Amino acid sequence: MTEASTPEFDRRMIEALVCPVTQTVLSYDADKQELVSKAARLAFPIRGGIPVMLVDEARKIED
C-alpha cells in the first residue's frame, strides 16, 4: 500500500479518543499521521486510517 492510497483519518474520531496513559486530549498531526499526547510525550501512529492506541507502538517525543 502506498502513501497515496492510505485512507484518510476521520478527524471526528479524535473527539472520542483520549490518551491511554493520561486520559487527556490528543492532537492530530496530519503530516506524520499520528495522534499526539503532549501530556504523555507520546505519538500514536495511524495505520490504514486506524489509530493504534497501544503504548508499545507509540513513538516517544523528545524535546
Image: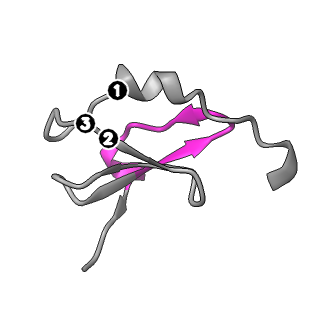
How far across and down, in percent of the image, does residue 63 sit? Answer: 25, 80
Are there few (<14), some (14-19), or many (20+) residues within 10 Å of tag 2?
many
Q: Give the range drawn in magenta.
A: 44-58
Label 1 amino acid? Leu
54 displayed left or right of 47:
left
Pick the front one: 5 or 52: 5
Q: Residue at x 70, y 35 (%)?
A: 8
The crowd level at tag 3 (other Cα within 10 Å; few <14, some 14-19, many 20+) is some
Alpha carbon of mark 3 to alpha carbon of mark 1: how far? 7 Å
Tell me: residue 32, above or below residue 5.
below
Which mark, residue 17?
1
| 22 to the left or right of 28 | left
Q: Is residue 52 above or below residue 40?
A: above
Residue where numbered disc 2 is placed: 26
Q: Can residue 1 be seen in this view?
A: no
Q: How far apart are marks 2 and 1 (CA)?
A: 7 Å
Residue 24 image-quadrant placement: top left
The residue singled out by tag 3 in the image is 25
Q: Does the magenta stretch include residue 49?
A: yes
Residues tagged 2 and 1 counted as in contact (Cβ below 8 A) = yes
Q: Earlier in the sequence, mark 3 or mark 1?
A: 1
- Residue 22, compared with residue 39, is above or below; it is above
**Looking at the picture, how far across and down is residue 11, in whole percent?**
53, 30
